[in-house]
Image (spheres, helix red, strand yellow):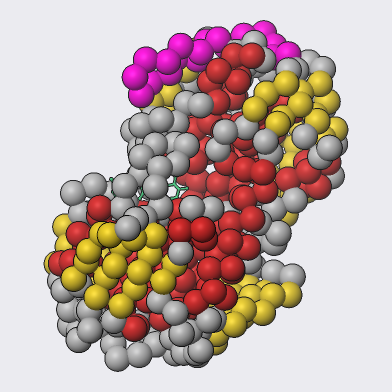
């Protein structure tokens, strides 16, 4: 991707449905033999394609048209998620709970490591065991059996996990009796999934709190559900405007899901307002950005998925900012790439001190993971001269029409 830096962003950017909600909602489709109709699905994302491939492999029928997707898992006849499909995308682990709950058996490849840390799945496995599943790990696969169905259980997570909360919440919808998930994650994507499950007939209370109660039912039915707007995409464009200056309307977004980011951006000197379902963001390029600190935390804290983008912004602040990453152990891969563009960043353990510099200069850089990649795009938008980003397939996993959306606001950016 080639970017010619130094253009302010002005215009309108439509926000897509949340990738991280859509992927789990697709898995929820496995819980019922009836059709689940999803709208506001993000388009042309590699991760959604991978999940579609996996569900079709299992025997589900998937129809797509623009932002609509209909999933029918009435003819599912396989219960295994093979390595080849899982290694492309860790989220395939989320078919484990639904398959086990509906069919009494599931076999899912262990995802393995990924660029941002070891990311184990022990919390998923321990929770399903507590619900009565017999689980063995062999030949790189998790093999789970619950021939007489899953039993409700009280599960206290030793650590807050988005994926484990979602997997166990889905599994519990078809278990016998009540399941309590304590120290559960509270991300908006989990509430979105829970609301869809409720429309499918599940009995769930406490969404958005740290204690979720699920009373199992015999079966779930079909429904229609609109995917929640993508808060990480929204936050990424907010930070882009903060960096380049300008005035942008983010259409169909949820400011209430971004309170932690908005507070930090305002502290840095960015203007943010709401207008119905839109967010208006502007910054006068003549006013300098001020340095401010962030620490990533489970929701409603500052999202780890916006850490790299925020760090890019800090590279050009007046003063300095401290970035502490508490969720993933290896999520500073963007630092050496930003340094190649002139940033002044010192990493110590899980913290990084970012001292503001006068300017970044365009360079050839390498994308490493999804959010680190977009952080380099943001750096390119504001750097002097030309930036070329290699290995952009990461971006295609998670940002719908990034080039189109930024170009429409005046960026000079091109996929080559
Ligand atoms: C989800 C998001 C990801 C985001 C992350 C944290 C999706 C598809 N991905 O990932 O974009 O960065 O939440 O907000 O929604 N852990 C364990 N054992 C487990 C599970 C997790 O130790 O069984 C650890 C992880 O290594 C990590 C922490 O818990 O250190 C949080 O991970 P988790 O919340 O599970 O992230 P994901 O659901 O994988």
Where does the image place residue 228, in percent across and percent down from the top left? 55, 63
* Residue at screen point 62% across, 43% down: 394
**Residue 305 coordinates in the image, percent (x, y):** 49, 41
Quarter of the rendering occupied by the N terminus: top right
Residue 348 belongs to the span the image colors magenta: yes
Furthest residue to the front? 139
Residue 70 figure quarter = bottom right
**Going 22% across and 79% down the picture, which residue do you hit?**
146
Residue 180 in view here: no
Q: Residue at x 29, y 67 (%)?
A: 143
**Residue under the point 53% across and 20% down:** 335
Residue 328 in the image: state x and y as whole percent: 37, 36
- Is 1 located above or below residue 183 in the figure? above
Image quarter where the C terminus lies is top right
Span of residues in magenta: 344-361
Q: Is residue 17 left or right of residue 157?
A: right
- Camera-side residue of 109 and 310: 109
Q: Is residue 219 magenta?
A: no
Where residue 270 sits: x, y (%)?
Answer: 61, 30
Instruction: From this view, report whether residue 223 is shown above or below residue 26.
Output: below
User: 88 or 4: nearer the eye?
Assistant: 88
């Amino acid at each position: 991707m080639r970017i010619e830096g130094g253009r302010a962003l002005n215009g309108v950017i439509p926000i897509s449905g949340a990738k991280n909600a859509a992927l789990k909602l697709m898995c929820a489709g496995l819980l019922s033999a009836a059709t689940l109709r999803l709208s506001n699905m993000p388009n042309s994302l590699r991760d959604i394609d991978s999940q579609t491939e996996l569900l079709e492999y299992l025997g589900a029928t998937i129809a797509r048209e623009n932002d609509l997707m209909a999933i029918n898992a009435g003819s599912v006849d396989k219960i295994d998620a093979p390595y080849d499909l899982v290694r492309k995308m860790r989220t395939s682990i989320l078919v484990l709970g639904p398959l086990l709950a509906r069919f009494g058996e599931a076999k899912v490849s262990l995802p393995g490591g990924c660029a941002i840390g070891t990311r184990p799945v022990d919390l998923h496995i321990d929770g399903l065991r507590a619900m009565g599943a017999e689980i063995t790990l062999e030949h790189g696969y998790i093999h789970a059996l619950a021939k007489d169905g899953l039993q409700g259980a009280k599960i206290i997570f030793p650590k807050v996990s988005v994926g484990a909360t979602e997997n166990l919440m889905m599994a519990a919808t078809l278990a016998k009796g009540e399941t309590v998930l304590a120290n559960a994650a509270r991300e908006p994507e989990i509430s979105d999934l829970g609301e869809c499950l409720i429309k499918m007939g599940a009995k769930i209370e406490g969404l958005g709190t740290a204690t979720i109660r699920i009373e199992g039912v015999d079966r779930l039915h079909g429904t229609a559900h609109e995917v929640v707007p993508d808060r990480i995409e929204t936050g990424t464009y907010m930070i882009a405007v903060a960096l380049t200056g300008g005035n942008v309307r983010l259409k169909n977004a949820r400011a209430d899901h971004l309170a932690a980011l908005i507070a930090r951006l305002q502290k840095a000197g960015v203007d943010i307002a709401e207008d119905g379902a839109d967010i208006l963001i502007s910054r006068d390029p003549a006013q300098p950005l001020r340095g401010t600190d962030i620490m990533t935390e489970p929701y409603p804290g500052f999202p780890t998925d916006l850490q790299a983008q925020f760090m890019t912004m800090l590279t050009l602040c007046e003063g300095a900012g401290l970035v502490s990453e508490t969720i993933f152990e290896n999520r500073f891969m963007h630092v050496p790439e930003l340094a190649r563009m002139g940033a002044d960043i010192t990493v110590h353990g899980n913290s990084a001190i970012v001292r503001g510099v006068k300017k970044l200069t365009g360079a050839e850089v390498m994308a490493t993971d999804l959010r680190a990649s977009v952080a380099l795009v943001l750096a390119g938008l504001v750097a002097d001269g030309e930036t070329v980003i290699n290995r952009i397939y990461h971006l295609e996993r998670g940002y719908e029409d990034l080039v189109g959306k930024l170009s429409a606001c005046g960026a000079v950016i091109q996929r080559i």
